[in-house]
């Protein structure tokens, strides 16, 4: 079944969500479509992922964004929705350890792979969280989950990054509050602790 983008100005009242130039079906409506397809007897594909160490199954359209599955189906709301077009980085999660934009990663692309969200880093007591607090990094806080996930991926592959490497790795994560210097200090704080070991 094809999901069509509506042109009606009243579309927002009818369960569609506009982000930038794109229309999306609201997650709840998407769940409704899944139900309708199931009632008509059409085959709904099943996908399985390892989310934060646990096996999870999702029945739905192959192009459902991973972000919707995480937030709406699994209730993992630490990962945020921003631009919906892969531009801001607020929805960053790890796919097999690599940072990806969950808003433009489909469930089919994530099928059979390991997904890690901020909830797992918090549960494991990742040192970045303490560094974020120590540097008073957040202002409004909205971008910070994505910032931390990108920083965690950087430190996993480069435990002692240079300033240039930090700036380069974090460049795709936007912060409208302009906390870039504090973010850099927080990442550096963890790297320096690693260097002092
Ligand atoms: S919500 Fe902006 S990159 Fe995903
Ligand atoms: S802290 Fe507000 S957008 Fe980054």
Image: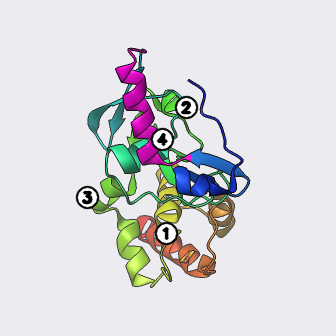
Q: From this view, report whether residue 181 is shown above or below residue 106.
A: below
Question: In this rendering, which labeled residue sits more in front, label 4 or label 2?
Answer: 2
Q: Is residue 4 visible?
A: yes
Question: In this rendering, which labeled residue sits more in front, label 3 or label 2?
Answer: 2
* Mark 1: C-beta under 8 Å from nearest atom of ligand 2: yes
Residue 135 x/y as whole percent: 45, 83
Q: Secondary structure at mark 1?
A: helix
* Mark 2: C-beta under 8 Å from nearest atom of ligand 1: no
Q: How many marks?
A: 4
Which label number is shown at residue 63? 2
Q: From this view, report whether residue 153 is shown above or below residue 88.
A: above
Query: Label 1: how many residues lie within 10 Å, few (<14), some (14-19) or many (20+)?
Result: many
Q: Secondary structure at mark 2?
A: loop
* Mark 4: C-beta under 8 Å from nearest atom of ligand 1: no
Query: Could you give the CA–CA distance between mark 3 and mark 2, rounded to whole angstroms?
Result: 30 Å
Label 3 belongs to which residue?
Answer: 123
Q: Earlier in the sequence, mark 3 or mark 1?
A: 3
Say left or right for 5 vs 195. right
Label 1 belongs to which residue?
Answer: 144
Q: Earlier in the sequence, mark 4 or mark 3?
A: 4
Q: From this view, report whether residue 87 is shown above or below residue 147.
A: above
> Going 67% across and 59% down the picture, which residue do you hit?
172
The range drawn in magenta is 25-42
């Amino acid at each position: 079944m094809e999901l069509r983008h509506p042109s009606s100005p009243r579309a927002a009242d009818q369960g569609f969500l506009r982000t930038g130039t794109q229309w999306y079906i609201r997650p709840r409506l998407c769940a409704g479509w899944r139900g309708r397809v199931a009632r008509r007897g059409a085959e709904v594909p099943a996908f399985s992922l390892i989310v934060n160490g646990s096996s999870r199954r999702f029945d739905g359209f192959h192009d459902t964004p991973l972000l919707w599955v995480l937030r709406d189906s699994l209730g993992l709301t630490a990962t945020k929705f921003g631009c919906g077009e892969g531009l801001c980085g607020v929805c960053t999660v790890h796919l097999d350890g690599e940072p990806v934009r969950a808003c433009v990663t489909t469930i089919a692309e994530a099928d059979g792979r390991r997904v890690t969200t901020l909830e797992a880093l918090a549960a494991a007591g990742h040192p970045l969280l303490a560094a974020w607090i120590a540097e008073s990094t957040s202002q409004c806080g909205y971008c910070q989950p994505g910032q931390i996930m990108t920083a965690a991926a950087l430190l996993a592959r480069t435990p002692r990054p240079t300033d240039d490497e930090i700036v380069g790795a974090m460049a795709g994560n936007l912060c409208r509050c302009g906390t870039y210097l504090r973010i850099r200090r927080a990442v550096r704080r963890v790297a320096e602790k690693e260097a002092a070991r």
